[in-house]
């Protein structure tokens, strides 16, 4: 019997739907088990096995007895898991259990329930190779609030603060009262970066709460990620705690992110974007992920044009407003998963996950348009120059990737204001090639028909790999022969060997499918040869 069918039948027989059926699909059987036996069976696989046996026995008895009684008889007489059972109404037991796991003052789950939940989440994450983050936060100067305004007011602050936290929670997140004025979140399948975004949104929402705003209530927090910061539960909590106290010591009302080496501030003080150090850590993690999963990503280095002249002509306040407005536009135009940082001064950096050079160029064009349409930036004639590099096409190492992006930025600055240059990919140079490239797909198989060819323009060659559209779908290992003529009508050619990925995409204009290949692992020396030919 299918899982969903069995669960529906059990729910029907018991006459109730589990509270967490929708929120915790991986704990459905154990959740149902808690409706018939206590202490309950916590492991999902074990609970499923028991329910299948119970239901089989129940069906064999021609349903003369209720499923609840069949379960009771199974655990008492077959499994001998109960010796002196006591009958109790479920609602009464539920109230008793809630008192044991819910904090009486705030109505949030308590520390004991948090520890059990964290163990479950850790097992789930380890089993499915997932990540999660914990976010520990503490109300700033709470002792002073208690001492100056009394414990009754202090309790009211805790209740209002807890309510605001619960209101700001996503469906999949859970907040707990960890103790005193400390609260903690478990954020499933959320990285440090995602947890930091959540924490910043939470801080913004709480700043608009009438009661908290009136009484100047703020908080400091620390974030740690499983398993990057530790695979041990107690060490993970300790690391989040360490990051939180770093935030306290740094002046409060801030959030610190823990890493392997130290807890550090992740944000730039002026713009609210990530800072340089945190950006480098994000690129390091993305680089390792890209290597492991064969993914592409791009780095963008940007600089506000004429910023030094602006600071000489205007006061510092205007320059700061320009930086803040530029940061706001970057946040609005980029995706949630993109990492945006202020590198320092008037420089910004972007890390675009799973985006090759064409995607980076499209984003920069949108940013350029947004800068032009912004009345404040237009008033001071603000534009930007940018340089782009892409992994794995431009580099096999992090330092090279940064170097090439900054080198492209310098070239853009030297070419004049409001320029965008990609490493080994300059669209102005591409305009010289009016004749199409002749690309021949030559599989190693002798059965290949030599007359299958495809013509593309140079702009179809992206740094994330070379894609070639084909009318037929050949499932064979291939080599790629490129012949083209440059502006001087000189013929050049290059043969590339790489790992072939076959793909199918739909042409929305012609309403038909196109098949093609992508060479994703082109040898570095061959890429250099191709780059020189393109730049010639």
Image: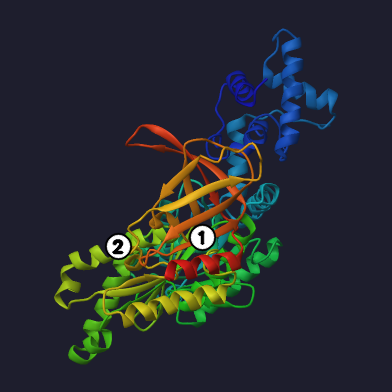
**N-term-proximal mark, 2 vs 1:** 2
Residue 41 x, y percent position in the rendering: 73, 37
Q: Quadrant of the N terminus?
A: top right
Q: Residue at x 38, y 63 (%)?
A: 489
Q: Which element is circle 2 on? A: helix
370 relative to 480, above or below: below
**Residue position for label 2:** 365
**Residue position for label 1:** 493
| Location of residue 512 by image quarter | top left
Q: CA distance from mark 2 to mark 1?
A: 32 Å
Question: Would residue 103 be visible to someone looking at this image?
Answer: no
Q: Nearer the viewer, residue 478 or 225?
A: 478
- The answer to whether residue 89 is left or right of residue 515 is right
Q: Nearer the viewer, residue 505 or 151?
A: 505
Q: Quadrant of the C terminus?
A: bottom left
185 relative to 395, above or below: above
């Amino acid at each position: 019997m299918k899982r969903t069918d069995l669960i529906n039948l059990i729910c029907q027989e018991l006459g109730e739907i589990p509270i967490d059926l929708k929120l915790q699909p991986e704990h459905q059987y154990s959740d149902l088990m808690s409706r018939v036996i206590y202490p309950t069976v916590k492991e999902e696989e074990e609970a499923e096995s028991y329910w299948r046996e119970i239901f089989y026995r129940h069906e064999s008895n021609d349903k003369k007895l209720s499923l609840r009684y069949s379960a009771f008889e199974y655990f008492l007489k077959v499994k001998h898991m109960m010796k002196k059972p006591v009958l109790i109404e479920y609602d009464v037991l539920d109230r008793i259990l809630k008192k044991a796991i819910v904090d009486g003052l705030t109505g949030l789950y308590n520390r004991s329930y948090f520890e059990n939940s964290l163990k479950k989440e850790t097992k789930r994450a380890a089993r499915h190779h997932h990540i999660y983050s914990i976010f520990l936060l503490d109300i700033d100067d709470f002792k002073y609030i208690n001492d100056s305004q009394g414990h009754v007011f202090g309790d009211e602050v805790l209740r209002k603060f807890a309510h605001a936290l619960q209101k700001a929670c996503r469906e999949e997140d859970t907040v707990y009262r960890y103790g005193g004025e400390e609260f903690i979140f478990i954020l499933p399948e959320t990285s440090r970066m995602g947890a930091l975004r959540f924490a910043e949104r939470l801080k913004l929402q709480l700043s608009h709460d009438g009661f908290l705003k009136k009484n100047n209530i703020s908080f400091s927090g620390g974030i740690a990620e499983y398993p990057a910061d530790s695979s041990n539960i107690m060490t993970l909590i300790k690391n989040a705690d360490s990051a939180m106290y770093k935030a306290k010591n740094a002046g409060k009302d801030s959030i610190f992110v823990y890493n392997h080496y130290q807890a550090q501030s992740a944000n730039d003080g002026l713009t609210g974007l990530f800072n340089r150090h945190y950006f480098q850590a994000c690129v390091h993690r993305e680089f390792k992920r890209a290597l492991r999963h064969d993914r592409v990503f791009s780095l963008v280095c940007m600089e506000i044009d004429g910023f030094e002249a602006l600071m000489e002509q205007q006061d510092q306040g205007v320059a700061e407003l320009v930086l803040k407005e530029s940061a706001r536009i970057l946040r609005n135009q980029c995706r949630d998963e993109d990492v945006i940082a202020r590198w320092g001064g008037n420089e910004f950096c972007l890390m675009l996950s799973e985006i090759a050079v064409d995607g980076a160029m499209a984003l920069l064009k949108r940013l350029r348009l947004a800068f032009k349409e912004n009345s404040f930036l237009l008033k001071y004639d603000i534009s930007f120059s940018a340089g782009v590099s892409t992994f794995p096409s431009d580099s096999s190492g992090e330092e090279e990737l940064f170097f090439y992006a900054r080198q492209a930025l310098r070239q853009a600055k030297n070419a004049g204001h409001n320029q965008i240059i990609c490493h080994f990919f300059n669209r102005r140079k591409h305009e010289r090639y009016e004749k199409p490239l002749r690309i021949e797909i030559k599989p190693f198989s002798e059965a290949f028909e030599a007359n299958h060819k495809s013509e593309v323009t140079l702009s179809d060659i992206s740094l994330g790999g070379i894609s070639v559209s084909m009318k037929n779908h050949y499932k064979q290992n291939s080599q790629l022969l490129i012949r083209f003529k440059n502006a001087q009508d000189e013929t050049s050619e290059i043969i590339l060997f790489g790992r072939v990925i076959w793909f199918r995409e739909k042409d929305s204009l012609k309403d038909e499918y196109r098949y093609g290949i992508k060479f994703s692992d082109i040898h570095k020396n061959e890429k250099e040869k191709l780059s020189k030919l393109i730049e010639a």
